[in-house]
Image: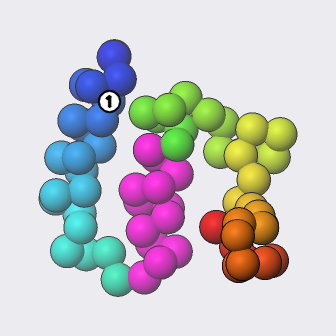
Amino acid sequence: MEFFEKLTSLAAKVRLQGPAIQTEEATKNAFVMPFINTVLGYDVFDPQEVTPEFVCDVGTKKRRKN
């Protein structure tokens, strides 16, 4: 499946399941992790590929999770 097809499939899932999602954690599990894994091709369970709640210093906002 190509990038556009994977993205289109996930977008359809978001439209169907979106109303049932009530929390940030549910959003991450239902939409963000599948996007990173299925669409972008990263292993979300490999800490060498994906770092959850990575802390980065940007401009004046220090030690902020992004």
Q: Which residue is mark 1?
A: 6
Question: Which residue is found at the position 23% from the left and 67% from the top?
Answer: 18
- Residue 13 in the image: state x and y as whole percent: 24, 50
Q: Is residue 59 magenta-colored?
A: no
Q: Which residues are magenta?
A: 23-35
Q: Quadrant of residue 65?
A: bottom right
Q: Is residue 33 magenta-colored?
A: yes
Secondary structure found at label 1 = helix
Q: Quadrant of residue 66?
A: bottom right
Query: In the orientation shown, which residue stands out farthest toward the top?
Result: 1
Question: Which residue is found at the position 71% from the left and 46% from the top?
Answer: 50
Which of 13 and 7 lies nearest the eye of the viewer? Answer: 7
Quadrant containing the N terminus in the rendered view: top left
Please tell me how many numbered marks the rendered image carries: 1
The reply, left or right, for residue 14 in relation to residue 50 is left
Question: Which residue is found at the position 25% from the left and 56% from the top?
Answer: 14
The reply, left or right, for residue 60 in relation to residue 18 is right
Q: Overall secondary structure of the magenta stretch?
A: helix
User: Mark 1: few, some, or many residues within 10 Å (few <14, many ≥20)?
Assistant: some
- Mark 1 is on which residue type? Lys
Q: Is residue 32 above or below residue 12?
A: below
The reply, left or right, for residue 40 in relation to residue 16 is right
Q: Is residue 37 above or below residue 5?
A: below
